[in-house]
Amino acid sequence: MLQYLVRHGESISNVEERVQGQADVELSPLGRRQAAAVASWSRAMLDAANAPDATWEIWSSPLKRARHTAETIAATLGLPVHIDEGLCELHAGIFQGHLWADLEARFPEAVARWRSGDVEYKIPGGESRVELAARGHRVLESLGRRDAAGMIVVAHGGVLTAALGSMLGHDHPLLAAAAQRPFTKLPALANASLTLLEWPGPRLVSFNETEHLAGE
């Protein structure tokens, strides 16, 4: 089974360089265009594979930036969107809603602990990297066992990269070669990027593909 992982389109908080976590943020105008580009790619991919739409599924985080990306894809394919709470982004606790540039001045101790790379450290009011990785791993593995030819899973950069690291190991060549996200030791995923897992396995076929976004 093919499992395409999609990071949501650009959000308003991405533009503002603000910590999102589980804050429910809308897509930016560019993010909406990126979602449409993923939808067009999805239509072309299924047509090229001669795959009946009904054999595929679309899953999403409940947060608006992911759900609206998924709904754009679903409208193009004529499929429903299934929601799984486990696909939510890291709960960033006291960091949520603040500008990245302001965090160090506002929360110096918490920022130092987070930057230390301690996977067990839980952001006050939020969750730890190890909790995030376990949650994401559990959801993607469960979805990978479904009776479907393939699926598109729309979620967030943090939960997707944490889950991939948990399943495949951070030294996997495709993950190790990727640029790191700011503030973490996880590989970065671009907005509206595509990453392909093949189940059973999983086997990471591709990571952070963005060719479908050319011109956006």
Image: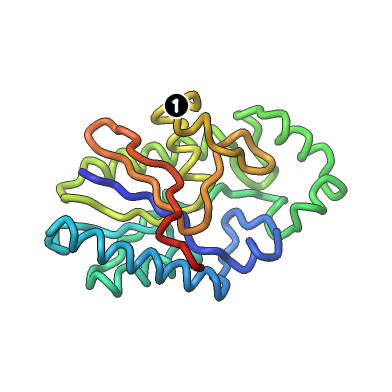
The quarter of the picture where residue 2 lies is: top left
Q: Secondary structure at mark 1?
A: loop
* Residue 71 in picture, x, y percent from top left: 36, 70
- Residue located farthest toward the front when viewing the structure as drawn: 215
* Residue 162 in picture, x, y percent from top left: 50, 38
Q: Residue at x 45, y 33 (%)?
A: 174
Near-viewer residue (49 or 143): 49
- Mark 1 nearby-residue class (10 Å; few <14, some 14–19, many ≥20): few
Q: Residue at x 26, y 66 (%)?
A: 43
The quarter of the picture where residue 168 lies is: top left
* Residue 133 in picture, x, y percent from top left: 48, 36
Residue 34 in the image: above or below residue 3: below
The quarter of the picture where residue 24 lies is: bottom right
Q: Amino acid at mark 1?
A: His
Near-viewer residue (133 or 186): 186
* Residue 33 in picture, x, y percent from top left: 47, 72
* 146 relative to 172 in the view: left or right: left
Residue behind mark 1: 172
Near-viewer residue (83 or 14): 14
Residue 75 in the image: above or below residue 53: below
Q: How is the image coloured?
A: rainbow
Q: Residue at x 76, y 57 (%)?
A: 99
Residue 121 in the image: above or below residue 44: above
Q: Residue at x 85, y 50 (%)?
A: 106
Q: Quadrant of the N terminus?
A: top left
Q: How many marks?
A: 1
* 103 relative to 127 in the view: left or right: right
